[in-house]
Image (cartoon, rainbow, N blue to C red):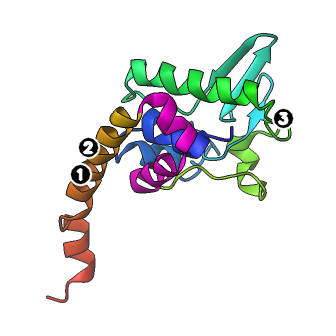
Amino acid sequence: MKHAAALAAITNPTVNSYKRINAPRTTSGATWSPNTVTWTGNNRTHMVRVPGPGRFELRLPDGAVNPYLLQSVIIASGLDGLAGQADPGPHSDLDMYAEGHLVKDAIRLPLNLLDALREYDKDALLKEAMGLEFSSAFLKLKHAEWNAYASHFTEWERANTLDI
């Protein structure tokens, strides 16, 4: 839980990953993806679901995640939590799809890839656990991807910001 924002850089490695995380509520009230750092029992609307003893489901990763890196960051974060006897915060049974907008005190996940990369870069324990050489190369690669995305003029910008 304490590494969630940094984990997002690995678990949600593309620009489009954050469109999923930060999707607005649909007419049905669903977002289908967590956007806050919360946990629950057997309720699929939170970032972490603990349906029974010895089991948990991390609902943060999307389909673009590298499965090998995913396992590594989960293990590194979990071992840190166990070593420090981390408190995961309050348990919640709230339906986050229908009533998540009412939660004011939960930590929000990064809004975009750049925010996630900044969080990863600040997380010394996670960077060391993943390997400093890997972390440096990963950050360099992902910053280049972000810069390529952010440096072009989109059709939306052309249509909505130019006076022609």
Q: Secondary structure at mark 2?
A: helix
Q: Secondary structure at mark 3?
A: loop
**Is 87 placed left or right of 157 in the picture?**
right
Tag 2 or tag 3, which sits nearer the N-term? 3
Q: Which residue is mark 2?
A: 141
Residue 106: x and y, percent?
Answer: 74, 51
82 vs 22: above or below: above
Question: In the rendered image, is residue 44 in sight?
Answer: no
C-alpha gap between disc 1 and disc 2: 5 Å
Amino acid of disc 2: Leu
C-alpha gap between disc 3 and disc 2: 39 Å
Q: Which residue is mark 1?
A: 144
In front: 69, or 11? 69
From the image, state whether disc 3 or disc 2 is nearer to you: 2
Residue 60: x and y, percent?
Answer: 55, 33
Badge 1: residue crowd in 10 Å (few <14, some 14–19, many ≥20): few
Amino acid of disc 3: Asp
**Is 25 placed left or right of 84 in the picture?**
left
1 vs 103: above or below: above
Residue 147: x and y, percent?
Answer: 25, 58
Mark drawn on residue 93: 3
Magenta-colored segment: predominant secondary structure: helix
**Is 52 placed left or right of 113 in the picture?**
right
Mark drawn on residue 33: none
C-alpha gap between disc 1 and disc 3: 40 Å
The stretch in magenta equals: 112-131
- Which quadrant is the N terminus positioned in? top right
At x 34%, y 35%, the residue is 133
